[in-house]
Amino acid sequence: MTAPGAMNLEQPSGDTLKVILSGDWKLSAELPGADKIRQKLEASPSVRNLVVDASQLSSWDTGLLTFLVNLRKFCSRQKISVNHDGLPDGAKKLLELAAAVPEKKDARLPEERVAFLKNLGDTTVYFFHSAGELLAFIGDAVVAVGSLLRGKAQFRPADLGLIMQSCSAQALPIVSLICFLVGLILAFIGAIQLQLFGAQIYVADLVGIAMVRLMAAIMTGIVMAGRTGGAFAAQLGTMQVNQEIDALKTLGISPMEFLVLPRMLALALMMPLLCLYANIMGILGGMVVGVGMLHLSFIQYFNETAKAVGLWNLGIGLFSGMVFGVIVALAGCMRGMQCGRSASAVGDAATSAVVTAIVGIIVSTAVITILCNILGI
Amino acid sequence: MPEKQAHVTVENLTMAYGDFVLMRDLTFTINRGDIFIIMGGSGCGKSTMMTILIGLKAPAKGKVFYGDVDFWGGDPQTRDRIIRRAGVMYQSGALWSSMTLAENIALPLETYTDLTPNQIQEVVSLKLALVGLAGFEEFYPSEISGGMQKRAGIARAMALDPEILFFDEPSAGLDPVSARRLDDLILELRDSLGTTMVVVTHELASIFAIGNNSVFLDVSKRTMTAMGNPNQLLAETRDSNLRLFLTRGEKS
């Protein structure tokens, strides 16, 4: 083992300071810094020359170079000349190389302090700008649906099939789990209250109506937002990064029709079916509690559910499901198309697709609920 | 040699990102049958120039003409119609990753022609064979090497027999032999099909081997400083930046 890097200072004459480096100058926390020399120089302002003596140096790496660069910066500010002649040849050459291209003064962006009002203004402008983009995107999507209805949309039926498969059959396990448990939880909460009045049988009504009219659609929507919406954003975002979307545009193929339309169509078609399936799973969850805990019979529970849940409830639930499907697909595709050209931009796009979709689902649930209330259904 | 006929004309073009002006006062003409090189150092706006020529980004100022038609002055339909006669090879190939090579090349054909599936398949095989990828029809882009992806990108760009082909850094990231083959391919296609080629590159070997006309974008002066045959430019230029570029930084 050689000795760790060390430094001694000598002052052979009034205007010269000698820096004697010894040992192993390898990058580590123990290396002496240039501060010691700075203090020494500040204490003796008469020094005009600095001589670096490296005759006792055993080995070196970047640790030595950063030390010397610091030293030289400080010395050139103080107009002290530095004599490197005693350094190893390699170190001298690297120092020259580092100084060969002058530092670009305007390359480092200054960290501006932005006034609060400017910040607020920027944010507001950005908000309206992105609201405009949202509307433009929805407009484009509607136009694409228009050309689909006229039978002129350009997309590959095979793509539609693949997307349908990935957002329906492959989503069944997670939708089953979530909706079964939600039905179970609803039944539990209801059972505790209803038992007080001896009205356990109404658990079936509670679970049935809640699931069919609202909860199944919302839960499926949220699952799909995380599962499929995020995936759409990541797919389109990566296509944006790889210039695949540019390639479509230069061939005159509308990305809106080729990429967004099949995704929107697939979710709009498959979401109602998923919702229907989610309804069944939710009711099954409730039935487990009803039969297992409240000692109702299957037939009783089934009859009560069938009596409580009307066709209107089912219709509203399935309609909501379709709306949520369109929202999830639009949010995912929009964020993907707006994606920047880097890996982190793809991550941001996926995150913001999920957030946008969930907000959209909750807001549209509120709108649908209020509308139904006004219409009295 | 028949008389030169202007294919693309650029007039007083300014490229900018927001307030940041990348290049100004660009005026040059690309003739039919040219292999036209857009060259310059990194960050000088070569690729941006291409995005303007292929209709992806609007210029801040100035005009681009295809023949006599104002490219950016007209409506988007005109632009679409013009650019459908062009093929583009992107830097990374930009093949559609969810489709096989055959499907990639077939898509433009399915969209714009009324060929039968059988005919399309024949065209696809021919185009792939032309770029040396015969037999790779059923491969996905991720299953072949970078050089093959670029060649497949060319096959797709040629699918509709375009009048003009754009190449964005065709030889970037390729080994010298593949780069040379790609250059030969570009020359061969120009000679046999008479296609106008616009190549964005800073690869000196390619520039001298294939270019018969060029424009040099000088990043320090923010404009073009030279135009003409690259070999001639090398022999005659007195501009120190261009000389430095064309001689790989050799001091004159």
Image (tube, rainbow, N blue to C red):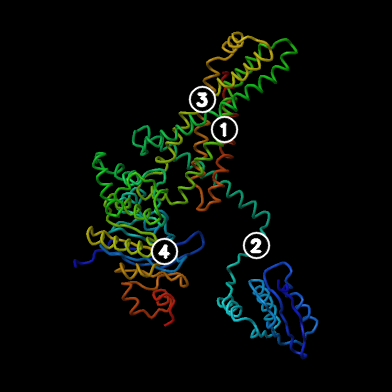
Asked if residue A301 shows in the view, the reply is: yes
- Type of amino acid at the residue the image marks with label 1: Val
Asked if residue B72 shows in the view, the reply is: no
Quadrant in which residue A262 is drawn: top left
- Type of amino acid at the residue the image marks with label 2: Glu
Contact (CB < 8 A) between labels 3 and 2?
A: no
**In this figure, which residue is indicated by the disc labeled 1?**
A223
Report crowding for label 2: few under 14, some 14 to 19, many 20 or more residues within 10 A (C-alpha).
few
Q: Residue furthest front?
A: A1
Is label 4 in a helix, a strand or a loop?
Answer: helix
Q: Could you say where residue B218 lies in the image, as x and y percent from the top left?
A: 43, 71
**In this figure, which residue is indicated by the disc labeled 3?**
A319
Query: What is the chain letter for disc 2?
Result: A
Q: How far is disc 3 from disc 2 in space, using C-alphas? A: 51 Å
Q: Do the residues marked 3 and 4 share a common chain?
A: no
**In this figure, which residue is indicated by the disc labeled 4?**
B46
Quadrant in which residue A355 is drawn: top right
Of badges 2 and 1, nearer the viewer stands: 1
